[in-house]
Every structure is written in structure tokens, then in C-alpha cells.
């Protein structure tokens, strides 16, 4: 008997419907303890009163079982990729393989102190170095640093490289960064932290960069243009060769925001498109887990000729041994080599995929996105009806008369056991709903999602109240954001007052 | 088809028909032909899981975990089994940032707990949901100060701040356009006299110090808050989180911003990361704090719930006017630190810090009882200290490493910095002393 | 349709100024409060602070946005609307009645650079 189209039968309900709402402090009882240390044979050293804190920190006192139950129950109110489909546009929520967790927890890696002698950690340095090389092969760049801790941090690091490049050549006045108006918020924020100014270039009606408008913005104050390709609408910027030529001709560099790298795997490389500096997101394209908001990793790559501008410390290889090089005069964006075990997870994924499977990632991610798009564009409004890459944007429901917003659709999806897609980004459309299925998802999963999305569109017309007041089956309902922001209660101490 | 790629040829055919393409290649007509990849990536072929395990076995054979007596920002603390078993749960590991509060109450609760614990340790009013590490958190605090005080763009940085942290702060200051002036050190601690003079010169937006400082010394910040606030600047203190279980807190010192790394709250050393930075401040600065913040609220069913709040400050809304560009932070490591503090509890956290102090003082005493070692500086320390050695420090460290011991970090020609934690037994300490004092280069 | 009051001066960044002799009451317009949504916080300057025309002097925060306040004129702050500290949503209730700062103008000529009600209404339509 084959699958009925209609259904969330093959969706597991992701989590416990009831809220476990306790805080560990509320389970604390004076005198309880959850730890054991061996007897100490060392003499006690009394520090002078003057250097000591006057009152103990009010940390909780619980037995081990209470701690375990508490966090286990909290996890049941969470929803991860391992629970269900997570079509968040721009986040690339693909499967985080279990073997990656195993390799990254090996004691011979986790028990290494970052400052121990090089000859006692050659294995770790080899893995790190080989990851740098692999990223070069995939992106077409000449060298990578794995130091930045996240994508936004990578952007900042990349912009520092760009500014250093111009300062080195005496072009101190080059501080303008051109950014498409469809860009992610981190782009202009990173530019501002780097002491640069943002200039927005408009998008055309087809969603791509308006090259004519770009021409008017190019002068000798331009340091770089920051782009993602495909762009935040999931469209390939086919004018990229010309854009790169124009920016280079005016003396600027091209920066690639690697958040949308996934569909390019197996298809093309940023280094071949004319990009000079770029970052990748290991927690997106390279399958490392999101962890509820990090740790991620944002390696930065540069074309040949810019390696000397990468931050310290760096890992090199002399043909026999690996070395850590620190340069006190160079830039630095972190104390050590970056989020090392996150890098190990990503490298493990690359080893698993190998060259033959890596090249299928882009095509399959793109196939998935187009399939979902084509299956829903009759009920959701598709402002740009062209083939997309790994993600696409709907502008809410086609039928606006129902008054049902993207927010409502997103909340109703939660009732069906899905994490909602990205909402209200990009800012180009009022009711943006950005969907990115990734290559991890099977046809069954996509079909189930499609049928739920169609059902919600139907509900919008026949029973709008149930959509407007969603979610109903999640542990909590909609949250009062105004209350949270107006009189912020941000600690247990304040809450308990 | 592959274990991570579920599409069968039949699936692909069906889907291609739906989207109106003949082959997968047809999906990329938008990509100029000259850009299309020819052939394969210059990468090895796929490894099966068994082969991956073998690869790592080979690599790990060339790593040598040591008995650690080094610190310099990263400490070898006891990790209860409970911690990795909870943090590894996939609902925590594979979930996204808690933007959809209805499906993220687990994450939001633990971040609220993390924030609460950090304010307890630092003695401050408010904490954010975490930063990347202690060094970048310090740099962000520097930026916060530079923005907070109008018409003042100079920040004073003590020479006694860890060099790795200082380098990151210098980098951020250089690009952002903040003038950084170093406050010299005298006898291993911040020169208070010079600091006062520098404050009097005017234009100062903030002062950054470290406690204990980069030599392991506990500094006396008496009068600092008054002097710094007197010129309307912000007082910033960087401390390793665990040390605050014992030491006079940044709050008690009158600091405005407290930053540092939580690695010492039981996070594995992991060859450099991931760790997690913390950033706490006074209530009056709350809306200037970068990063995510979780707050309490209510849902439409009347339940107490938690939600990301004060997001108007953040990059996805304010864009170039954001207080920072931070997006992903180190959430899962914040969970690690939170579960560690919950498991060790009020008493255990103190005990870990106390034993680290005991061990360090015992080691210092034993090492200097013999003629080859001398304390580099006078003054109180906590769990880390510097000794001058009359021989070749590099050779000594090499000798100790060959015996399976990381004896410390070389900080100068003849100086070694050593740290002790609650994991180091009296026996291990005695053995280090024996090997170190008995070493003939 | 957002409310626009006659007799006030308006800036492109949606602040208004109500002139009373040498003093001006500055606030945000109805259009602005509507775009922001429920206001949760108003970041105000202090008495005696110097304002410069075209320069940022504070901010208005809602859940979904934070907007800088740009001063339409130069002058000295003589009064700040303390009521907004506890009840920032007053700006939503009546943006025109609830001014944010009262300034003593240093250069009345700057008023010529501002729009009148009609011009502002046109501006909002763009």
C-alpha cells in the first residue's frame, strides 16, 4: 500500500506538548550537592580577606538526579533537526552526522591544551591544516584561516583583510562597502564594526543586483562589494562576471558571503567568479550542528597574494611537520586557532562525502527547493517566478483577502510538527517566507511538508481563526514580546524579586 | 545515492518532471558555462565510517595529551559525566537559534539560567546570552565604552592584560577607529599612578584591566572605580569565570562591564575551542549590550515563558547601527557551563576554585624551596603564578613533556607561568617538582 | 492615514517641532509611531545637552525596530519628558501630544530647512 499524499503521518511529533517551565534555581535546596571530588591532601591556603568576595555566588544546590531530570525535560521542549524538518531559508539546516560528534569527542583531541608543544599535537594540526586545504579546493581560494568563530565574525575578519590591503597600498580613503539592499543584517553591521561605511545598491525587479545602479556607486572610495551568490532570494547573480570586473576596475575587492554556498557545491566556485575574499559557515554548508545558537565557525579564504593579511595565529606545514605561527604585529580575531572541534566535525563530514558525493550537494539541494516551489506556487505568492537555487521566497499567501499573514502561517506550521521557514526576511517583500529544504531531505518529507502547507492555505480561507490563533499544540502559545522588552527581567534574581 | 543523500534515481526523475527540467544540469542554466566546474574537486574520494575511524586513530596516535600544569587562559578542570551526556542530547545539539520561542523553551530556559549564573559570579546586574570567547568579549566591551561616552574615543588598556586578549582588542580598536593607550605595569601589576595621570589627560571612554592579571597576580583596584567614573569613563574587568567564585567581583570593584571566558567552568580544553565568552554589565547599560539576551514574559495561555528580547539592538534589525555584528554565539557551550555550574553547585564551584588555589600555592612553595626556581613577582596569586628559572626554560619544558607533563607556559627568557587545578593531585605536583628541580640541561 | 497637524515643522526623518517663542518641543510624528509599533523604550538626552541639527540625539525602540532620533534644530535641552520613562507607549497613544524634548533654539534660521504640514504629507506618500 503506498503513501497517501495527504499527511503528516510520517512526521513524528517533535516534542512534549506540555511546558516544563522550571528554572534550576527553583529546584535548589541548601545543603544538596551533585558532585564528588576526591579527598584533598593539599594544605589549605587562606587568601587575605581583601581579595575575596564578601558573599558567595548564589548558584543552585541540587543532587545529580534533579539536575539530569531538569535538563532532560527542557530538551523535550526543544525541536532540532533530529526531530523534524527545518526549512529555514538562509540557515541550511542539513543533517548533522553522528560520526562527526564521535570524532570531535575523541580524548586525544579534547584533552589537548592549545599551548602544548607542537610535537605533541601533530595529529590535531594535520587535521586542521588539511581542512584549510580542502576549503581551498572547494572554493577556489588560495589560503584559509579557520580562526573566526562564526559567519558574522568571518565577515568582520574578511573586511579587515580588505581594509589592510588598501591601507598597505596607501588607499586609506577606501572605506566604502557596497552591499545589496537584499543583504543579511550582519553584512552592514560587520562593515560598521570594521570602521567602514555601507552603501546600498538596489535590486532589479528580477531580484538581482541592478548593475546600472552599481556603476553610479563606483569611485576611489570603494573598498569592496559584499555579495552572496546565490543572493538572499535564492537567485544566481548571473551578472557576476561583469560586476566583478566593474568593482576590480575601480580598484575595489570582491567579498563573498558564504552563507549561501550550499547550492554551489558541485556547480561552481566563488574563486572562479572573481571573488577575492570570502567566508564560509561550517554550521551551514558543512553540516556542523547549530547548537541552539552556536558554536559555529566562519573560516575566511583569500585569493593568492592576500595570504599575508590573514590574522594570527596560523598553521603552516614545512613538508614534514606542522607549525603554529604567532605574529604579535598581525591582526588577531581570537586567542587560539578557532572553534577547533567544530572544525573537526566539518572535516569529518568532508571525509565522509568525498569528491564524488560533495558534487551532488548543490544539484540535490537545488532540485529540492525547486520541487517545493513548483508544488506550492499556486497557493503561495511567488514574486519572482524563475528557477531558484537552494532556497526561494514566497510573499505570503496568494489570497490576501483572508488577512492571514506569514507570521500566522509560520505559527500554524508549528502545530503540524515543522519548524517554520525563515519569516520576514529578506526585507524586500512584506510577507517574506523563505524556504530552504537542503539536500538531506527525502521526497517523502518534502511531499508531507507540501501537503501541510496546502492545508494551511485552505484553512486560511475556510477557518482563518484556527490559523490566526496558532500555535495550539506547542508547549507555549504566542509570546508577549512587548512585555519582555518593556520591563526586561533577565536574571533569576530579578524574577524572584 | 548515499547515506546522507536520500534521492533515488526514481525520485530524481519524478522531481525533475515536476520542475520542468530534463536533467539536474538543466537546473543551472543561469550559471555562465565558463564558470561551471569541470571534473571533480581536488579532494580524496569518500571514506566509509570505518575508514574515518581508522583515519582518526592514525591522527590521534600523533597527539599526546599531557598532565596539564599550564593555564594562560585555558584550564584543565574536572568535567562531571553528567555534563557531556546532557549537552550531547540532539534536541539541544541540533536545534536552531531560539527565534521561534514556542519550540525553543528548552534553549531559552538554559540561556536564562546562564545569564543568571554569570550575574551571580560577576556581581553585575545583567548578562547577555554569551560571546565567542573572552578575548572578543573584551574587544566588544571596549567598543561599548567607545560608543557610550560621547566625544571620548580613547580606551586605556593595562599592560597586565593577557597578550593574546590585548592583540584582539588592538585589532578591533585599529579598524574601528578607537585610540588605545597602554597603561604600563610596575612589579607585575597595573601602574595606578600612571593610570590616574592618563585619566586626567581627558578623552578617555573606558579602562580595561584583568583579574588575576596575565602573570597570575591578584591586583588591587582600590580607587579605580572612583577615578574612572570621575572622568565619566567605563570600568571594564576581564576575569576567568571560575576565579570569581572566590575573588572580589567586578561588581564589588565598581566595574561597569565584566567580561571573560567561561572555559574554566568545566569546558574541555579542546585544543583552543569552542569556549564561551561572557559579558555582563550594570542595569543602566543594558540596552547597549551586544549579542542576544533572553528575558521573561508570558504567553497567551498565561504561562511564564522565556523569549529573545531587546532584539531591536541587534544586527538583524538595526543593521549598520547595531551595537555589534554578532549573530551566532556559543550557545551550546553556554549550556555546558550552565550544567557544570548546576552539577557542581554553589559548593562544588567554590571547591574547584579553592583547590586550584591550594594546589598552586603548594606547588609554588615546593618549587621555590629549591635553588633553581624563584617567584618572579611578590604579591598574591590565585591558581596561576610565574617563576624565574636559572636554566633553559624551553629545554625544561621539553624534558617535562617527554615525561608526559605540560609544565607551564614560557613567558620570558627565564620565566615560566604555571597553573594548577583541582584535577592535579599532590602526587602529580610532587612528581613535577621532582622532575623540574632535578633536571640537568 | 497618519495624522498630520497643521502649524508644526516637520523633518524628513519623521520628527516634528512645535515652536513656542524661542523654544521648540520635539517629538516623533504619528506616521513614525505607527511604523515602529508598540514603543517599549525611549532613549532620551539629559537637560543641558547640546543638540545639533541633523545629528542623532536619542532613540525610540519597539520590539521590531529601533529608530534614531535626529534633531531638526540646534539648541540646548531644557526639559525632557520624564513620563516617557515609565510609559513609553504614550508615543503610540498620541505622538503629537507627547513631546520628547524641549529645546532652546540657537538658530531660528534652521526652521527654514524644515517642512510644513502639506509638504510633510507629500513626503509620507513617497
Image (cartoon, rainbow, N blue to C red):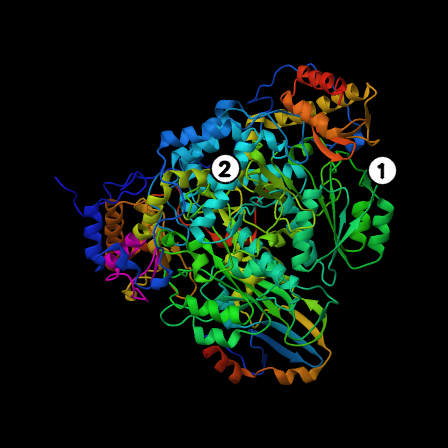
Does the rendering let one see residue A70?
A: no
Judge the density around disc 1: few (<14), some (14-19), many (≥20) Cα neighbours within 10 Å. few
Identify the residue position indicated by label 1 in the image.
Answer: B187
Residue A391 among magenta residues: yes
Quadrant for the C terminus of chain A, please. Answer: top right
Write the start and end of the magenta stretch as one range: A366-394
Q: CA distance from mark 1 to mark 2?
A: 42 Å
Please identify the residue farthest to the front as the structure is shown. A319
Residue A205 among magenta residues: no
Q: Position of residue C62 (x, y in %)?
A: 52, 60
Q: Position of residue B34 (x, y in %)?
A: 36, 63
Callout 1–callout 2 Cβ contact below 8 Å: no
Task: Say which of B338 and A86 sits in front.
Answer: A86
Residue A388 in which image quadrant: bottom left
Disc 2 secondary structure class: helix
Quadrant for the N terminus of chain A, please. Answer: top left
- Residue found 81% across the figure and 39% down from its top: B189
Q: Which mark is residue A127?
A: 2
Position of A29 with respect to B399 (left or right) is left
Amino acid at each position: 500500500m503506498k503513501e497517501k499524499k495527504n499527511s503528516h503521518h510520517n512526521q513524528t511529533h517533535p516534542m512534549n506538548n506540555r511546558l516544563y517551565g522550571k528554572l534550576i534555581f527553583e529546584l535548589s535546596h541548601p545543603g544538596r550537592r551533585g558532585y564528588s571530588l576526591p579527598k584533598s591532601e593539599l594544605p589549605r591556603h587562606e587568601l587575605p580577606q581583601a581579595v575575596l568576595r564578601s558573599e558567595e555566588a548564589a548558584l543552585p544546590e541540587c543532587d545529580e538526579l534533579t539536575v539530569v531530570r531538569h535538563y532532560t525535560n527542557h530538551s523535550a521542549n526543544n525541536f532540532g533537526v533530529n526531530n523534524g524538518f527545518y526549512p529555514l531559508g538562509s540557515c541550511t539546516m542539513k543533517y548533522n552526522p553522528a560520526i562527526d560528534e564521535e570524532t570531535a569527542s575523541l580524548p586525544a583531541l579534547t584533552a589537548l591544551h592549545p599551548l602544548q608543544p607542537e610535537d605533541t599535537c601533530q595529529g590535531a594540526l594535520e587535521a586542521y591544516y588539511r581542512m584549510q586545504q580542502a576549503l581551498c579546493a572547494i572554493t577556489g581560494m588560495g589560503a584559509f584561516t579557520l580562526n573566526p568563530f562564526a559567519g558574522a565574525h568571518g565577515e568582520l575578519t574578511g573586511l579587515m583583510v580588505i581594509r589592510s590591503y588598501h591601507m598597505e597600498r596607501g588607499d586609506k580613503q577606501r572605506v566604502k562597502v557596497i552591499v545589496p539592499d537584499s543583504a543579511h543584517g550582519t553584512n552592514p553591521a560587520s562593515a560598521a564594526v570594521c570602521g567602514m561605511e555601507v552603501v546600498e545598491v538596489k535590486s532589479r525587479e528580477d531580484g538581482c543586483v541592478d548593475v546600472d545602479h552599481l556603476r553610479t556607486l563606483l569611485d576611489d572610495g570603494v573598498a569592496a562589494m559584499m555579495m552572496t551568490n546565490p543572493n538572499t532570494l535564492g537567485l544566481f547573480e548571473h551578472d557576476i562576471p561583469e560586476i566583478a570586473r566593474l568593482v576590480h576596475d575601480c580598484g575595489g575587492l570582491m567579498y563573498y558571503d558564504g552563507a549561501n554556498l550550499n547550492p554551489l557545491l558541485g556547480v561552481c566556485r566563488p574563486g572562479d567568479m572573481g571573488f577575492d575574499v570570502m567566508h564560509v559557515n561550517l554550521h551551514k554548508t558543512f553540516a556542523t550542528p547549530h547548537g541552539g545558537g552556536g558554536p559555529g565557525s566562519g573560516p575566511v579564504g583569500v585569493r593568492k597574494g592576500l595570504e599575508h593579511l590573514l590574522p594570527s595565529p596560523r598553521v603552516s606545514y614545512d613538508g614534514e611537520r606542522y607549525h603554529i605561527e604567532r605574529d604579535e604585529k598581525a591582526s588577531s580575531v581570537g586567542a587560539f586557532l578557532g572553534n577547533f572541534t567544530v572544525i573537526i566535525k566539518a572535516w569529518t563530514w568532508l571525509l565522509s562525502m568525498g569528491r564524488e558525493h560533495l558534487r551532488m550537494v548543490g544539484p540535490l539541494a537545488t532540485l529540492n527547493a525547486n520541487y517545493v516551489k513548483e508544488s506550492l506556487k499556486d497557493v503561495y505568492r511567488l514574486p519572482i517566478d524563475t528557477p531558484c537555487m537552494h532556497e526561494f521566497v514566497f510573499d505570503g499567501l496568494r489570497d490576501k483577502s483572508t488577512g492571514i499573514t506569514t507570521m500566522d502561517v509560520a505559527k500554524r506550521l508549528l502545530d503540524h510538527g515543522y519548524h517554520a521557514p525563515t519569516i520576514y526576511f529578506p526585507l524586500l517583500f512584506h510577507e517574506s517566507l523563505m524556504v530552504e529544504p537542503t539536500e538531506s531531505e527525502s521526497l517523502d518529507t518534502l511531499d508531507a511538508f507540501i501537503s501541510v502547507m496546502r492545508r494551511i492555505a485552505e484553512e486560511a480561507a475556510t477557518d482563518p481563526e484556527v490559523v490566526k490563533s496558532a500555535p495550539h499544540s506547542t508547549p507555549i502559545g504566542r509570546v508577549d514580546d512587548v512585555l519582555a522588552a518593556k520591563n526586561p527581567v533577565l536574571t533569576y534574581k530579578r524574577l524572584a524579586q | 545515492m548515499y547515506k546522507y543523500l536520500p534521492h533515488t534515481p526514481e525520485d530524481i526523475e519524478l522531481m525533475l518532471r515536476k520542475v520542468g527540467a530534463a536533467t539536474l544540469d538543466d537546473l543551472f542554466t543561469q550559471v555562465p558555462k565558463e564558470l561551471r566546474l569541470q571534473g571533480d574537486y581536488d579532494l580524496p574520494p569518500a571514506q566509509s565510517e570505518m575508514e574515518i575511524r581508522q583515519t582518526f586513530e592514525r591522527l590521534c596516535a600523533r597527539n599526546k595529551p599531557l598532565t596539564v600544569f599550564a593555564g594562560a587562559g585555558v584550564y584543565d578542570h574536572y568535567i562531571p559525566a553528567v555534563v557531556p551526556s546532557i549537552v550531547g542530547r540532539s534536541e539541544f545539539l541540533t536545534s536552531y537559534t531560539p527565534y521561534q520561542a514556542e519550540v525553543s523553551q528548552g534553549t531559552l530556559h538554559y540561556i536564562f539560567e546562564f545569564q543568571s549564573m554569570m550575574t551571580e559570579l560577576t556581581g553585575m546586574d545583567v548578562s547577555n546570552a554569551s560571546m565567542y570567547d573572552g578575548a572578543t568579549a573584551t574587544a566588544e566591551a571596549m567598543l561599548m565604552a567607545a560608543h557610550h561616552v560621547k566625544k571620548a574615543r580613547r580606551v586605556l588598556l593595562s599592560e597586565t592584560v593577557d597578550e593574546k586578549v590585548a592583540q584582539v582588542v588592538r585589532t578591533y580598536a585599529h579598524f574601528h577607529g578607537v585610540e588605545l593607550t597602554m597603561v604600563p605595569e610596575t612589579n607585575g601589576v597595573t601602574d595606578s599612578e600612571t593610570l590616574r595621570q592618563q585619566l586626567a589627560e581627558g578623552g578617555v571612554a573606558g579602562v580595561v584591566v584583568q583579574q588575576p592579571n596575565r602573570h597570575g597576580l591578584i591586583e588591587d583596584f582600590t580607587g579605580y572605580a572612583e577615578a574612572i567614573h570621575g572622568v565619566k569613563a567605563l570600568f571594564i574587568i576581564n576575569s576567568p569565570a571560575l576565579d570569581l567564585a572566590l575573588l572580589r567581583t567586578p561588581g564589588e570593584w565598581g566595574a561597569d562591564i565584566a567580561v571573560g571566558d567561561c572555559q574554566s567552568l568545566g569546558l574541555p580544553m579542546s585544543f583552543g575551542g569552542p569556549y564561551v565568552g561572557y559579558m555582563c554589565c550594570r542595569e543602566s547599560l543594558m540596552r547597549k549590550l551586544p549579542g542576544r539576551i533572553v528575558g521573561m514574559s508570558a504567553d497567551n495561555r498565561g504561562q511564564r515563558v522565556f523569549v529573545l528580547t531587546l532584539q531591536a539592538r541587534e544586527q538583524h534589525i538595526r543593521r549598520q547601527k547595531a551595537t555589534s555584528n554578532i549573530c551566532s554565539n556559543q550557545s551550546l557551550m553556554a549550556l555546558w557551563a550552565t550544567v557544570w555550574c548546576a552539577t557542581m553547585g554553589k559548593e562544588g564551584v567554590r571547591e574547584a576554585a579553592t583547590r586550584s588555589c591550594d594546589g598552586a600555592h603548594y606547588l609554588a612553595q615546593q618549587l621555590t624551596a629549591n635553588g633553581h626556581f624563584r617567584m618572579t613577582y611578590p604579591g598574591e596569586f590565585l591558581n596561576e603564578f610565574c617563576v624565574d628559572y636559572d636554566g633553559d626554560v624551553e629545554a625544561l619544558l621539553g624534558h617535562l613533556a617527554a615525561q608526559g607533563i605540560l609544565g607551564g607556559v614560557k613567558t620570558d627568557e627565564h620565566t615560566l607561568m604555571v597553573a594548577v587545578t583541582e584535577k592535579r593531585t599532590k602526587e602529580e605536583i610532587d612528581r613535577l617538582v621532582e622532575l623540574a628541580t632535578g633536571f640537568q640541561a | 492615514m497618519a495624522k498630520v497637524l497643521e502649524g508644526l515643522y516637520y523633518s524628513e526623518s519623521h520628527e516634528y517641532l512645535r515652536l513656542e517663542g524661542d523654544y521648540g518641543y520635539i517629538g516623533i510624528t504619528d506616521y513614525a509611531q505607527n511604523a515602529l509599533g508598540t514603543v517599549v523604550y525611549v532613549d532620551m538626552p539629559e537637560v543641558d545637552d547640546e543638540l545639533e541639527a541633523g545629528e542623532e540625539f536619542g532613540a525610540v525602540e519597539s520590539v521590531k525596530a529601533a529608530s534614531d532620533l535626529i534633531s531638526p534644530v540646534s539648541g540646548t535641552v531644557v526639559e525632557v519628558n520624564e513620563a516617557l520613562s515609565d510609559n513609553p507607549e504614550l508615543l503610540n497613544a498620541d505622538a503629537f501630544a507627547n513631546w520628547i524634548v524641549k529645546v532652546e533654539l540657537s538658530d531660528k534660521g534652521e526652521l527654514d530647512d524644515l517642512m510644513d504640514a502639506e509638504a510633510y504629507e507629500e513626503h509620507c506618500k513617497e
